[in-house]
Each structure stands twice: as C-alpha cells, then as structure tokens.
Image (cartoon, rainbow, N blue to C red):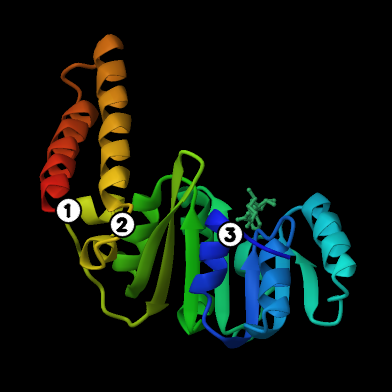
Amino acid sequence: MELSGRLKLIAQMVPECNIVCDIGTDHAYIPVYLINNKKCEKAIASDVRLGPIHIAKRNIGEYNLLDSIETRVGDGLDSIKENETDVIIIAGMGGLIIKEILERGKSKAKKARALIIQPMYAIEVVHEWLCDNGFEVYDEELTKEGYKIYDVINAKWTGKIKRKDNLYYHIGEKLFEKKDPLLKTHIENKIRQLDKIINEMENMKQRDSIKRKECIILKEKYKKARELV
Ligand SMILES: C[S@@+](CC[C@H](N)C(=O)[O-])C[C@H]1O[C@@H](n2cnc3c(N)ncnc32)[C@H](O)[C@@H]1O
C-alpha cells in the first residue's frame, strides 16, 4: 500500500517502535502501512464505531496482517492498557475531540514515546492543551493535498508546563524554527479564513464583539509573522 499527502506525513512522523496504536483508525491504512514498512512490530487499530472497525478488519485481512494488527472498539485511549503502546496516533479528527481524548487518557498519553497528532481543524486547542499539560512538540510539519494544508505534530510528555503567545497555538512554533516550506502559504490561508470570519461577524452586527476584536488582533499577528517567513 502506498500512502500520499496527509497520511504519508503521519506515517513518516512515526518513529521505529514496538507497538503503535492508531486511535480513530477508520480504514486502518496507517497501521497497515507501518507494519508493511517494518516501522513497528505490532499495531492496535482502534475506533469508537463498529462500522469503521469492520472496514479496518477487511483491509487488514487483504494485506494478510491479521496477526500483526489487532482491532479494538473503544472511546479514545480507553481501548488501550497503561504501558501497552510506545507510539499513539490520533489523526483526522477535530482539535476538540483530540483534546478530549488526550484529557481522558492523559496517563497513557504521558507514557507514550511519541504522540503523533493531526487535527483537521482547531489545532490551537490541541497546542494549548499540550503546553498546559507538560507535553513538548518535538517536530511539526505541513503537507499539502489538493488545495488543503495539513499539520502533523510529534509530541512527548516532559512535565514542563509552558504558556505561549496564542499565535503559536494557531501556528506551531516548530514550523517557524524549521522554516517549513509551506508556512507562508499556510499563514496566508489563515489570514483569508480570519478575514472571512471578521467580515461575517460585522454583517451579523457583531462589529464590536470581543470575539471579533480577538480575531482582528490575531490577524495582525499573522501578518507580522508572514513578514518573518
Ligand atoms: C475522519 S476519520 C479519520 C481516519 C484516520 N485516522 C485518518 O486520519 O484518515 C475519524 C475516525 O475517528 C473515529 N472517532 C471519532 N471519535 C472517536 C473517539 N472518541 N475514539 C475513537 N475513535 C473516534 C471515527 O469513528 C472515524 O472513524
């Protein structure tokens, strides 16, 4: 199986390990790829719904990997035991759900050698949670699929709690440090999205709302950040 774009970057971020766990696995493409490419010995493909697990089992079976990839049904990290897995992947969900999964399964997340996280939106919620709970982002990278840019984070618990400027919750600091080639386009997309929200709020007679003012301040930060890239 070949992966491309978003899924490929997620798989690339996974360090070589013994057991990987893919939460919200859906099709199980990531665990299949990781086992086939010998990045890990075993994998747990877990999902909260039975439908995706049936699809995952079928795909795993097609690649003759039923001995190496176990499927489980469960909410977030409830399906894994403490110390059972080296690497945890949580990808393709909104930032709020990811935060809830991490919060509920915090003790398991703290024990992972790496947390590979890819929020589809509301990444700021995830970045802030990681900082508030002593997780450090060791790597972060952007990838483009069609017109859309996706952000993949590699984090690990260190116990060092940090507060950051909210710019870095919306756009990971590592992306600036690494001078990610997609960063400028990413910031420009974010400015366009914020412009849309700011204008919509004006039309909805929320011209002077606190939320709109916060958006305007954030947009200025994006514009300054764009000049530095
Ligand atoms: C859009 S799919 C993403 C699939 C894959 N991870 C990817 O990145 O392509 C999201 C999956 O997460 C599952 N999901 C949603 N909330 C979940 C939770 N709390 N625990 C486990 N799985 C969850 C859904 O059932 C769905 O299969």
Disc nearer the start of the sequence (1/2): 2
The residue that disc 1 covers is: 229
Residue in view at x 46 percent, y 79 percent: 110
Disc nearer the start of the sequence (3/2): 3
Q: Is residue 136 visible?
A: yes
CB at mark 3 closer than 8 A to ligand 1?
yes
The residue that disc 2 covers is: 181
Amino acid type at image mark 3: Leu
Circle 2 residues within 10 Å: few <14, some 14–19, many ≥20: some
Q: Secondary structure at mark 2?
A: loop
Disc nearer the start of the sequence (1/3): 3
Amino acid type at image mark 2: Pro
Residue in view at x 15 percent, y 19 percent: 208
The residue that disc 3 covers is: 7
Q: CA distance from mark 3 to mark 2?
A: 18 Å
User: Who is closer to the viewer here, 188 or 47?
Assistant: 188
Q: Secondary structure at mark 1?
A: loop
